[in-house]
Image: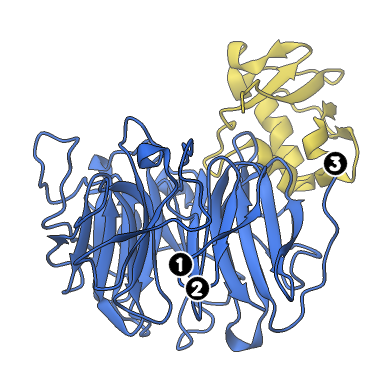
């Protein structure tokens, strides 16, 4: 197995976490421009979820390597991939009496600074797992595990996955999760109980276009300074809520398609959101064969294409739900199913190709070491 | 009793291609139970948390796939060879 040279990460380095269907890669921004790449870690295994936890003095990478043969696990590294925690450990398990078996980990979300030892996982089959000891132990969140809707949840094309977790950051506070294709659910009590919050969101693929639940939400984003204002990229449909998901309004104003997967907030501006429209669910490629990121700076009242440095012909690309990320002050990153990774250092106004030829990219996260 | 591992799992068995499980257990399920005690990480690669064989893992006893010979209740003898192989898969 040929792997790229390991690199040392110093404090202040910008680091990219790239999950692909054949392993994980790390990128490090070079001083003066360009990127070093390190990997693959977990060669041959799919890595749909990665995260960086810098709370409470940590410098910990998380990754969820998995195999369709041997199952999925969760591993961490405290030295930026120099070594990873136990290959033979399976810390995330459904209880035997649930009848469920872990298929894939889709999301790793460290909690807020107010809860420095809390981490949540979104997994398939759809459930939320929680650790309250910084990842030493995990348990499923009972209120979702035993939710009365569970027996009627149907999987999307990617599986019955809980892929999005957002919250107000308050201990015992409000959270919202999204499941394909069950929709958005909100808890107002730290996860004890959950209520579907999909009013106004279409389900194009169902006879009833506005059911209580069953929508195929692809991503939800919000900003910590205004957590109750949510943006939602649906399987057909682009929405905003100003009331923590009680109601949703259509904001597909000027996009070439309101189908898409990825969505990310600008880290410094609660009015600025990025998406990558996809032509349709039948043709999951960028519209007009142009690779365009769309940005709103006014909370969805208008959207504008960002194209400088991105191919504008013969670009049949797809950017999946977790393959778009932002990092303060104005950095934006995304990866494609064709193995390209792009970066912008100016809010998306212009882009550079970080790397081509990677395996299909399914997860992009960014952090400052 | 010999359990022959595919290359992908040998790291979990000290880089060995074969692990020996002691005793005269008479069914595959019993052999895997003994494997679990000795190599829990290896067992978890073969079985789900519900105790089912992972769908893309095949176990052969003396050349026969246990999916067609009784599953985990397939009989084994002391001299049996148990072969673990991943199923053929694209991608």
Colour used to depict chain A in the structure image: blue
Q: CA distance from mark 3 to mark 1?
A: 38 Å
In the rendered image, residue A36, in percent from the top left (x then y), is placed at 76, 62
Colour used to depict chain B in the structure image: yellow
Q: Quadrant of the C terminus of chain A?
A: bottom right
Q: Nearer the viewer, mark 3 or mark 2?
A: 2
Q: Do tag 3 and tag 1 residues touch (Cβ < 8 Å)?
A: no
Sort mark 1 into few (<14), some (14-19) or many (20+) by Cα contacts within 10 Å: some
Q: Do tag 1 and tag 2 residues touch (Cβ < 8 Å)?
A: yes
Q: Which residue is tagged 1?
A: A349
Sort mark 2 into few (<14), some (14-19) or many (20+) by Cα contacts within 10 Å: few
In this rendering, is residue A10 above or below B68? Answer: below
Residue A147 visible? The answer is no
Labelled disc at residue A346: 2
Whichever of callouts 3 and 2 sits on the residue coming sooner in the sequence is 3
Residue A340 visible? The answer is yes
**Is A4 or B27 nearer to us in this picture?**
A4
Q: Chain of mark 3?
A: A
Labelled disc at residue A333: none
Q: Is residue A71 left or right of residue B77?
A: left
- Give the quadrant of residue A270: bottom left
Q: Which residue is tagged 3?
A: A1
């Amino acid at each position: 197995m040929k792997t790229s040279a390991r690199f040392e990460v110093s404090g202040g380095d910008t680091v990219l976490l790239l999950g692909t269907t054949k392993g994980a890669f790390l990128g490090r921004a070079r001083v003066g421009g360009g990127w070093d790449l390190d990997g693959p870690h977990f060669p041959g295994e799919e890595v749909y979820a990665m995260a960086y936890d810098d709370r409470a003095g940590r410098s910990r990478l998380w990754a969820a390597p998995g195999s369709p043969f041997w199952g999925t696990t969760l591993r961490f590294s405290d030295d930026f991939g120099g070594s990873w925690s136990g290959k033979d450990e399976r810390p995330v398990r459904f209880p035997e009496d649930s009848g469920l078996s872990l298929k894939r980990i889709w999301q790793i979300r460290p909690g807020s600074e107010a809860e420095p030892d809390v981490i949540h996982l979104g997994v398939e089959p759809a459930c939320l797992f929680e650790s309250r000891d910084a990842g030493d132990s995990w348990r499923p969140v009972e209120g979702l595990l035993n939710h009365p809707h569970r027996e009627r949840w149907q999987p999307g094309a990617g599986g019955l996955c809980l892929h999005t977790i957002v919250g107000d950051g308050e201990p015992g506070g409000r959270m919202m999760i999204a499941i394909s294709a069950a929709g958005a659910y909100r808890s107002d009590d730290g996860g004890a109980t959950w209520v579907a919050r999909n009013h106004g969101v279409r389900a194009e693929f169902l006879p009833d276009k506005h059911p209580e639940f069953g929508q195929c939400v692809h991503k939800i984003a919000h900003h910590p300074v205004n957590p109750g204002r949510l943006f939602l990229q649906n399987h057909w449909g682009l929405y905003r809520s100003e009331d923590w998901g009680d109601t949703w309004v259509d904001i597909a104003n000027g996009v070439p398609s309101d189908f898409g997967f990825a969505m990310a907030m600008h880290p410094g501006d609660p009015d600025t959101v990025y998406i990558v429209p996809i032509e349709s669910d039948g043709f999951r490629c960028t519209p007009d064969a142009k690779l365009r990121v769309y940005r709103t700076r006014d909370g969805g009242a208008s959207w504008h294409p960002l194209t400088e440095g991105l191919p504008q012909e013969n670009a049949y690309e797809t950017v999946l739900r977790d393959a778009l990320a932002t990092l303060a002050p104005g950095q934006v990153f995304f990866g494609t199913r064709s193995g390209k990774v792009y970066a912008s250092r100016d809010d998306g106004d212009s882009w550079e190709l970080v790397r081509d030829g990677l395996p299909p990219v399914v997860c992009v996260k960014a952090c400052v070491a | 009793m010999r359990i022959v591992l595919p290359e992908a799992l040998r790291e979990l068995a000290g880089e060995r291609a074969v692990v020996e499980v002691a005793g005269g257990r008479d069914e595959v399920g019993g052999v895997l139970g003994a494997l679990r005690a000795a190599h829990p990480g290896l067992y978890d690669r073969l079985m789900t948390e519900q105790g089912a064989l992972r769908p893309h893992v095949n176990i052969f006893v003396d050349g026969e796939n246990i999916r067609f010979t009784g599953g985990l209740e397939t009989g084994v003898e002391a001299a049996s060879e148990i072969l673990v192989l991943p199923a053929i898969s694209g991608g």
